[in-house]
Image: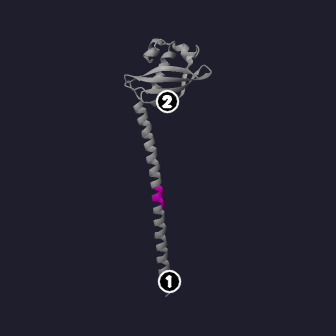
Amino acid sequence: MKNKLPLIVIISMVVMLVLVVAAIVLLQGSSYNAKSSEIAEKTAETQRKVDEITNAKDTNNFTPTELVVAFLNEVKSDATAKAKLYLDSSVQGMDIKNTLKLGSDLANMTVGDSEQTVESDSSTVSINLVVGTDQVARTFELVKVEGVWKIKGITAI
């Protein structure tokens, strides 16, 4: 009987050890599944954002926000004729500087945060600008004309 007691204790400990290892493996498996699901959701969301940006690009490979920034850079460098190339034909006669209402310190203008919404062939870009010491917001309405984004309107907020 003395020899059987330690054998029973050893077998019991081995069985408990196997059960603990099995429990750990099962817990890690469920944790892995949760993490895997979370990663899959983040990947899908990132792919949706990439698709949104890709679908928003025009035939010149500009997103609406990129077009607005390019337009503002032309205005900043006082290239009004080039800036008008970014305008829709319905607003070609626009006095750009007067419409933007940014004052005379355009050389020091910097572009800040922006937000873009795209619905089919129209888009709205809200953008923050820093001119001198002032921070101002402008909203640009864009339309796609023959596959190319064009600015249709500018609102000084």
Counting residues from the N terminus, which is met first, the one under dot 1 or under dot 2? Answer: 1
Q: Identify the residue shown where x is 50% and y is 79%.
A: 9
- Tell me: 9 left or right of 58: right
Q: Which mark is residue 5?
A: 1
For the residues labelled 1 and 2, the Cα–Cα distance comes to 76 Å
Q: Residue furthest right?
A: 133
Q: Identify the residue shown where x is 45% and y is 47%.
A: 39
Q: Which residue is mark 2?
A: 116
Residue 26 location in percent, x, y? 46, 62
How many numbered discs, if any? Answer: 2
Q: Quadrant of residue 25?
A: bottom left
Q: Secondary structure at mark 2?
A: strand
Nearer-the-camera pick, 55 or 109: 55
Amino acid type, label 2 = Gln
Residue 57, above or below 11: above
Residue 46 location in percent, x, y? 44, 40
- Tell me: 133 left or right of 1: right
The image quadrant where one finds the C terminus is: top right
Task: State the extent of the magenta-drawn residues as a range.
Answer: 27-32
Dot 1: within a 10 Å radius of its alpha carbon, few (fewer than 14), some, or many (20 or more) residues? few
Amino acid type, label 1 = Leu
Nearer-the-camera pick, 87 or 15: 87
Residue 9, above or below 55: below
Nearer-the-camera pick, 141 or 102: 141
Residue 81 location in percent, x, y? 45, 12
Q: Secondary structure at mark 1?
A: helix
Q: Identify the residue shown where x is 41% and y is 36%.
A: 51
